Image (cartoon, grey):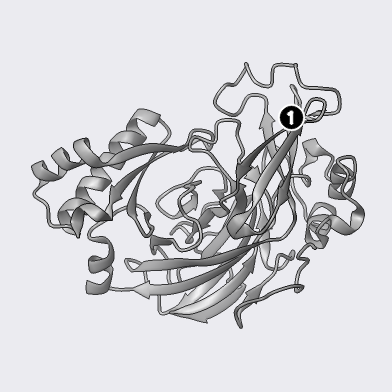
């Protein structure tokens, strides 16, 4: 079963499907963007997200045909994927690839507040996903793809083509398995862990905001730990916050080296709450960037076009958190981070690279 707009389980009273009116293709909202939904602080919302895989120009901009040659009947292709590819203007290489749902206004949010996003759960909208490597992007530009892919894998449309690898998914979001078939009867299997590659607020600018690079607003963070049960805190920049989502993933490894993760459309249940003043300070201290939280860790974020600088920014952000939220003297915090915290590369493929630091809660009980 696939989850077309309005079909299947819709958990909350506030549901936002993907339509030309509720979404944008290739651009993130800014402070001039008109909200497509308005809710009170503390409200749970159900939001559909649409993967860009199968709708882009270098894949034919015809999802029914793209997935049809991979064994998916027309009834197994999402209606909103067909509608987006057919009806929404998009220029490949100028507009970003991502479909963004939103923005959602959270009433009462002001610049300087924090938006708390609780990830309540996910449903898979389709039982398949795609990983793509476009030549000139990814961690090995000029090396991959290398031409060894079997016939039918390489899709023309860019100077060096696009390799799009189709993967089946068995099971449900909370306990699913990706099945990647290759060769003559060979397959590898790995667990899925769905999350939204993009969650963010609207930046305080009138300029167009591309979807690929993440920033202080969040956006394309691609942090694999933001699964069901996690929380993301976002510094609010405009009145109403202007929250938006996109880039749904079924699974991703740290680094996202091929350019994309296992991309597949998701339905997300999220709770949006505004934290102000002392409440914001108690939750996050004096952070400057988005901050994630799981049952086991706080997740501090560094972002920069240079990976070395992204690492340094992650260390600085972790120091700020340890000082202002956990009460550690700065030199003790630096010592602790060196001895016990884990710094991981979130992604290296979105122009602005990401490093996140995992601070274990067990160390501060």
Residue in the image at 25% along x and 46% along y? 318
How many marks do you count on the picture? 1
Q: Is residue 203 left or right of residue 246?
A: left
Q: Position of residue 119 (x, y in %)?
A: 49, 65
Q: Quadrant of residue 21?
A: bottom right
Could you tell me if residue 155 is visible in this image?
no
- Reply above or below: 244 against 344: below
- Where 357 sits versus 147, above or below? below
Image point 85% across, 54% down: which residue?
A: 86
Residue drawn at (62%, 58%) of the image: 173
Viewer can see residue 239: yes
Q: Residues within 10 Å of mark 1 (few under 14, many from 20)?
A: many
Q: 143 or 254: which is nearer to us?
A: 254
The quarter of the displayed image where residue 158 is located: top right
Residue 232 x/y as whole percent: 41, 60
Residue depicted at 43% across the width and 71% down the height: 239
Quadrant position of the N terminus in the picture: bottom right
Residue 206 percent across, percent down from the top left: 50, 57
Point out the image quarter for the C terminus.
Answer: bottom left
Q: Where 298 sits versus 268, above or below?
A: above
């Amino acid at each position: 079963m696939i989850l077309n707009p309005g079909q299947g389980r819709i958990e909350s009273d506030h549901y936002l499907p993907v339509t030309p009116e509720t979404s944008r293709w290739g651009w993130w909202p800014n402070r001039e963007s008109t909200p497509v939904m308005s809710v009170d602080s503390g409200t749970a919302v159900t939001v559909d997200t649409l993967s860009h895989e199968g709708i882009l120009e270098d894949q034919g901009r015809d999802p029914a045909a793209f997935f049809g040659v991979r064994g998916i009947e027309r009834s197994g292709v999402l209606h909103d994927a067909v509608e987006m590819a057919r009806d929404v203007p998009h220029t490949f290489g100028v507009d970003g690839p991502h479909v963004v749902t939103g923005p959602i206004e959270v009433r009462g949010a002001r610049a300087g507040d924090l938006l708390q996003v609780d990830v309540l759960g996910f449903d898979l909208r389709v039982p398949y996903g795609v990983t793509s490597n476009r030549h000139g992007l990814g961690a090995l530009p000029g090396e991959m793809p290398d031409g060894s892919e079997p016939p039918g894998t390489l899709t023309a449309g860019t100077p060096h083509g696009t390799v799009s690898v189709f993967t089946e998914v068995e099971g449900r979001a909370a306990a699913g398995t990706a099945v990647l078939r290759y060769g003559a009867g060979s397959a590898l299997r790995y667990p899925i862990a769905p999350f939204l590659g993009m969650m963010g607020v609207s930046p305080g600018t009138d300029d167009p905001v591309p979807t690929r690079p993440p920033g202080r607003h969040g956006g394309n963070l691609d942090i694999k730990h933001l699964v069901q049960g996690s929380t993301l805190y976002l510094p609010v920049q405009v009145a109403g916050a202007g929250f938006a989502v996109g880039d749904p993933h079924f699974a991703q490894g740290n680094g996202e080296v091929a350019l994309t993760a296992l991309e597949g459309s998701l339905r997300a249940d999220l709770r949006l709450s505004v934290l102000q003043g002392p409440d914001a300070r108690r939750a996050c201290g004096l952070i400057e960037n988005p901050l994630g939280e799981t049952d086991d860790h706080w997740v501090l974020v560094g972002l920069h076009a240079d990976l070395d600088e992204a690492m340094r920014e992650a260390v600085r952000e972790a120091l700020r958190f340890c000082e202002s939220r956990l009460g550690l003297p700065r030199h003790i915090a630096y010592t602790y981070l060196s001895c016990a915290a884990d710094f991981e590369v979130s992604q290296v493929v979105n122009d602005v690279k990401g490093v996140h630091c995992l601070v274990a809660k067990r160390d501060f009980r």
